[in-house]
Image (spheres, helix red, strand yellow):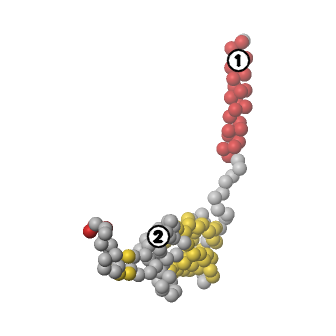
Amino acid sequence: MADAIRYLGQGVFYALFFLPVVYFSHQPQHQHLPEGMAELKIAVRHAGATIGECTDVEAGVYTPLPGNKQRPQICPRQRSPLQFELRMDGKPLYLATAAPSGLHDDGVASIYRRFTVPTGRHTLQLRMNDDVTVEGYPWVLEEEVDLQPAQVMVASFKDGFRLQ
């Protein structure tokens, strides 16, 4: 009789433990994106063009230095910021200017953004300028895409834009 009561008590305690686990594993329902929506991600990491030109060093300036440390030219390190534009169906969705990283603005510039957009056929236009001496956008991608519900599309840049 004592064993039966002990087993019944264990069953009650197990039930009290597992009922909340079962409830919280099924509730609340999680939906990553609203119904009829897709996600568009922009992931760009790129070093802009160097600002300025190399200048010749006058003869005799580096003569006290050893031969391996003498330079014929001094070149700037600072890089251009990235000017980025994302348009969807002809309307601007995102405009940004990303400054280069680094102590002397000599590193890469990074852009990462997520957008929840409606599904269906859209015209995406990605434009980027990585050189302050150039007018307009030398890097352009215009593409028709058909976004499905809950689809995640990533736009990246490596020697040109890519949609995946």
Toward the top, the furthest residue is: 1
Relative height, residue 36 to residue 139 (above, below): above
- Residue at the spot 63% in from the left edge and 68% down from the top edge: 116
Earlier along the polypeptide chain: callout 2 or callout 1?
Answer: 1
Q: Amino acid at mark 1?
A: Arg
Q: Amino acid at mark 2?
A: Asp
Toward the bottom, the furthest residue is: 135
Relative height, residue 66 to residue 2 (above, below): below
Left or right, 133 with reference to 149: left
Q: CA distance from mark 2 to mark 1?
A: 72 Å
Q: 43 or 102, which is in the foreground?
A: 102
Q: Nearer the viewer, mark 2 or mark 1?
A: 2
Q: How crowded is the residue under tag 2: few (<14 C-alpha within 10 Å), some, or many (20+)?
A: many
Q: How crowded is the residue under tag 1: few (<14 C-alpha within 10 Å), some, or many (20+)?
A: few
- Residue at the spot 30% in from the left edge and 72% down from the top edge: 63
Q: Secondary structure at mark 2?
A: loop
Q: Position of residue 89 (x, y in %)?
A: 60, 81
Left or right, 157 with reference to 6: left
Left or right, 114 with reference to 61: right
**Whether residue 5 is visible:** yes
**Mark number for residue 6?**
1
**Whether residue 156 is visible:** no
* Residue marked by disc 2: 106
User: Which corner quadrant of the image does residue 31 belong to?
Assistant: bottom right
